[in-house]
Amino acid sequence: MSTSTPTNLTPSQIEKQSIAIQKDIADKKAQEAATTSLPSEEIERQRKDHLVKAMVARNQREQFHHYFDGMNYNQDYQSNEDAANTYLRPKKNNADVRVNTATSEKKLEAMMNELLSMNIQHEVRAFDNFDNEIKFLGKDLEDMVTRSNEIEREEGMWEDSVRELVTQRALFVKEEFEERTVTDKRSPNKKHIIRRTRKRVIPGRKVYLGDMTLPAYRFNEQPFILEVDIVNKQAARALFAENPNWGKVKPGGKFNESLEFDARGFAQWRLNDVDKEQYEIVRYYSYPDDEYQIYVNGVPMLPVDAPLPWEWEGYNITMVTIKPIAADFAYGKSPMSSAKGLQALENETIRNLITKMRQGLRPPLGTRGKKVFSKDIWNPGSVTQGVDKNTFQTLISHEGVSNSDMVMFRQISEITEEFIGVSRVAQGLTSKGTQTATENLNQLRQSIKMMGLAILALLRLRVDVTYLRIYDILENHTKPIGRKLDPFTQKTVDKFMSFTLKNTDLGFGEKGTKKIIFTQRNFTPGERQGLFKEEQRQKTRGKNIRLRTINIKELKKIPLVWYVTASQQERQGSEVDKLMINEKIAQAASVEKLSAGQVRTNWQSIADDMAAAWNDRDLFQTEAPQELAGPQQSPEHQDELKDFDRQIKELEGGSTGLGQQLTEASRQQTRLPSTEQAVAQAA
C-alpha cells in the first residue's frame, strides 16, 4: 500500500475512488485500528515455539552439505534447474564463448516422455479389520479416484511432477480440498457450492523438513513441516482480509531472526527476504502434535493449538525421491543432479573446442615492432602500409580442432547419456552404424532398465497420491452438498456427491456407464427389483448402465484398511493397445479350440474392447435383446435376474456376500453398498 494513500476522506469521497485505492484505505485503517497491546502469553508461547523450529529447519537446510556436492539446498536446487533448462552463463570476457550443448535438457525431455507414456494407474482394494476383502467397495473407491483425477485434469500436475522428480532431489505433492461459493452471473441471487479435490506440486525450495535424517519413505514421522510461499498483496488480501489479525500484518521485510512484536503488535520475524508489497506465508504442520498454524509475515492467523485441517492419519503431503543417498538422509539424487557435473564438463569442452577452432581460423599473431596494428587489417580488401608477410608471426602451433579432440568430446557426451539413462533410440536419434530391429528393441529395453529407479519412484508417487485421494474423498465428499427429493420415499433428503464414469468395466465382461452415489440408507428388495428392470430397459436402448450406491452411515461403521497398488497400463486406442487385442483374440481362440468347446470365449467383451480401441461405437452390430415386460420372462432373463439379485445381496451383506466374510459379532451391523436408482431419477 502506498504511504501517500489518503485515509481522512469522507465515505462519499472514498466511494469515488478506484477499487484498488478503496482496498488500500481499508487495509490502512485496519492497521491503525489494530490493537496496540502485545499478544497473549499463549499466543506468544506457541508463536515462539513454531518460529524457533522454523529457524532450525531453515538453518539445517541452508548448511553447505556433503550430500549436496558442497552446496546448500537452494544452491543445489538452482544448479539442477540451470542444467535442466540449459542455462547460458554470462560471458566472463569478450573472448569467452557463450554456449551450452543442451545434452542434459534433451535427455531429460526423452526421459519425461518415456515416463509419461507409461500411463501409471492405480488399483484399490478394501479390507475390514479382520483382513477380509470387501471387493466391490474397493472397486468403487478405485473408480471414484479415477473420476476425481479426470475432473481435476491431473495431466498438467503429472507433467510437473515427473519433471520435478527427475530434476530435483525430492518431489513434494500436496492433496487439497477446495470448497467455495460461486454466484451465477446470469442470476445474481442464485449461488452454488463448488467442492473439488486437487493435487498440487510444491517446489522443493518451498518445503522445510523438521528432521532431515528421516528418509522419504518415513515422511509421516516428520516432527513438523513448513510450507513457505511469497505472494503479492492481492493474493494475500484475498486469503486473509477477513482474518481479525490481518490489520497487524506489515508488508515487506528482510530476513530477521527476531521473535518479538513491536509496540503496535507487528511481527519482525521473516524466514526469507520479502520485497515491498509482498507477504511471506508460512504454514506450519505437525502431525505428532496435531497442530496447524499460518503465519503471514510472522503474524499468526489461526487460534492457538488449532488442529490439522484433515482427519486422516499422516500429512496431506507426500515426498518421493528417485535414488536414496543414505539411510539417514531425507533427500535423494535425481538423474539431473548426477549428470550436471558431466554436463558442465561437456559445456567447458565445447567452449574450448570453439576457442581452438577460432585460433585455427584466425591464430593470434605477434610483431617485434612498436607499431600497433588494428585487427581490421585482416578484413577482406583492406590495405595496410609498411607491412609484409614477415611482419607477423603466429603464436600457436596447432591448426584447430583435431580428430582426437572430437573423440574426447563424443566420449564425454556418451558418459553423460549413460548417467541420465536414456539411449539414442529412446530419444528418437539414430545410433551409429546399421542396426537391426532386434538390436534397437534390445537397446530400448536396456534404456528402460536403466530408468528402473525413476519408474519405481513414479509407481510410489501414484500409490501415495491415491491413498491421499481416498482419504480426501471419504472425509469431504461424504458430506451433503444440498437437498433433493427421494423418488422412492417422496421425502426431501440430503444430496451427496456422485461420480460418473463412461466406457468403464461393469463386471461380468461388460463395459458401459457407471454411476456411484453416496446415500444415507439401504434400498428395499422392491426398489432393487425396479432398479434392475430400469437398467435392463436402458440396455435395450443401447445404454449399458450400472448404478452403485454407498451407504455413508454403514460405511463409517466399518473399520477399513485400504491397499493400493500401481501398474503400467497401455492407453486406450494406442497402437500397442490394438496389437494386444489381436493377441487376446488369438489366445482366446486357441483356448476355446484346445478345450474342445468346454471353455467358450465371450466375443462380445472382445468386440467392446475393439470398439473402444478404435473409438468406433458402430464397429459391430448386434441385435438388441427384447425389452423385459411383465412376469413372463425367458429362462435366460430369469437366470440373469437371479445373478443380478445375488450381486445386490452380496453388496448389502447378504448370505452370499459380506456376511460370509465377517465374524458373527460384526455380521449384523456391516453392509456393503447397494445399487441405486436409475440415471434419470438420480440426476
Image (tube, helix red, strand yellow):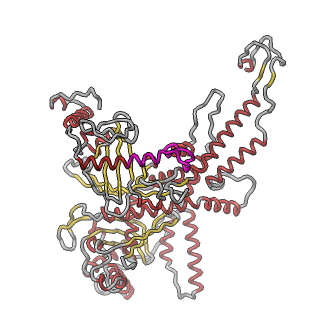
Q: Quadrant of residue 538?
A: bottom left
Q: Quadrant of the N terminus?
A: top left
Q: Which residue is found at the position 73% from the left and 33% from the top?
A: 357
Q: Which residue is found at the position 75% from the left and 41% from the top?
A: 405
Q: Position of residue 624 (x, y in %)?
A: 40, 76
Q: Position of residue 557 (x, y in %)?
A: 28, 74
Q: Is residue 670 left or right of residue 73?
A: left
Q: Nearer the viewer, residue 275 or 669?
A: 275
- Can residue 474 be seen here? The reply is yes
Q: Is residue 74 magenta?
A: yes
Q: Quadrant of the C terminus?
A: bottom left
Q: Nearer the viewer, residue 537 or 200?
A: 200
Q: Is residue 92 above or below residue 616?
A: above
Q: Residue furthest right?
A: 390
Q: Is residue 100 magenta?
A: no
Q: Position of residue 365 (x, y in %)?
A: 77, 23
Q: Residue furthest top?
A: 385
Q: Nearer the viewer, residue 450 or 308?
A: 308
Q: Position of residue 605 (x, y in %)?
A: 48, 75
Q: Is residue 621 above or below residue 265?
A: below
Q: Quadrant of residue 177?
A: bottom left
Q: Is residue 226 above or below residue 363?
A: below
Q: Which residue is found at the position 35% from the left and 37% from the top?
A: 278
Magenta stretch: dominant secondary structure? helix
Residue bounds of the magenta highlight:
53-75
- Can residue 541 be seen here? The reply is no
